[in-house]
Amino acid sequence: MTDPAVLWAACLADPTDDTARLVLADLLRESDDPDQQARGRFLWAGVTAARWSRDSDVIDDPLYYSAQRELAAVATAGHPAHWLGFLGVGPDPLTRTDWVWDATHDRVTVRIGDTTGTYARGMLAEVAVTLEQWLVMARPALAGWPVERVTVTDAPGLTFGVERIGREWRLEARLKLGGRRVPMSGASVLPFGMSVSPVLADGPAEWWVEERFGDRATLVEGVVAASRVLVADLRQIAGDRWPSPPRKRHTPPR
């Protein structure tokens, strides 16, 4: 019998290969371990649901709805939340009140506190975390999942992207900012387009930097150090335009 770890590694090596995912799903569903069974069911359902376009007005194939029911069953049981929790997200252990989930097509999004993880085609593909959280979870996240996009929640506009290019892997950090107007009187920064005079105007801006790795193992080993360097480079480029953390909204008690 094929080793599930070998098939999982194949899925990480080529995140676009749905055949490898389906073979792995079949193998995991035959496991005696409930968590492995759940991974297999979720993986099969995610790949199957993704066969239909998200833009389809009408889907009349019963297989699609079987996949949707399987995604919902596994998500409701809390498995995707706990898989995200294994990366160091949320309290340990997680309880049912610590997480919520929703789904659109093949994408299942889990929220634990201020952190979100999105599964696409049955595997974790995106996370939204603080920069500090990313530096803690980056290695186990990339070692275990084909994460492609990271949104940094405490630096609005900052994202990381992970992409295979030929035999290499690219880690990209990108900062995308809207325009702003800075009153010359020294008042606070205003959104671009507000009429205040006299002002200095900065238009929208976008910068990106990257580092490449010879293989995925090297990427996993070096992702934390590379993330720090790329952020430092963007900070230097952005200067005083580096984004501040968003203000937290406080809901008054009723």
Image (tube, rainbow, N blue to C red):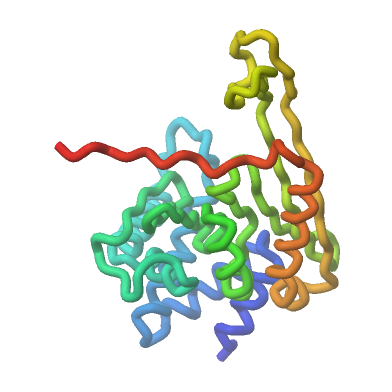
Q: Is residue 229 visible?
A: yes
| Residue found farthest to the bottom | 1
Identify whether 36 is placed above or below 94: below
Left or right of 146: which side holds 107?
Answer: left
Of 225 and 220, the residue lying toward us: 225
Which residue is most to the front? 185
The one nearer the camera, 188 or 15, is 188
Q: Is residue 48 visible?
A: no
Residue 237 quadrant: top right
Q: Is residue 196 above or below residue 19?
A: above
The image shows residue 31, relative to residue 178, as above or below, that is: below
Indicate the position of residue 20 as horizontal and vertical percent values.
Answer: 62, 70
> Which quarter shows the N terminus?
bottom right
Picture coordinates of residue 42, whole percent (x, y): 43, 65
Determine which quarter of the picture holds residue 74. Answer: bottom left
Viewport quadrant of the C terminus: top left
Depth order, front residue of 130/48: 130
Query: How many badges with numbers are in the image?
Result: 0
Question: Which is more toward the observer, 86 or 129?
Answer: 129
Tell me where residue 89 appears, x and y as whole percent: 44, 66
Tell me: 23 left or right of 93. right
Q: Left of 180 or right of it: where is 64?
A: left
Q: Is residue 75 above or below residue 9?
A: above
Residue depicted at 75% across the width and 54% down the height: 172
Q: Residue at x 58, y 88 (%)?
A: 3
| Percent coordinates x, y for residue 70 in the rendering | 35, 60
Q: Going 63% across and 40% down the picture, which residue do you hit?
A: 243
Residue found 23% across the figure and 37% down from its top: 252
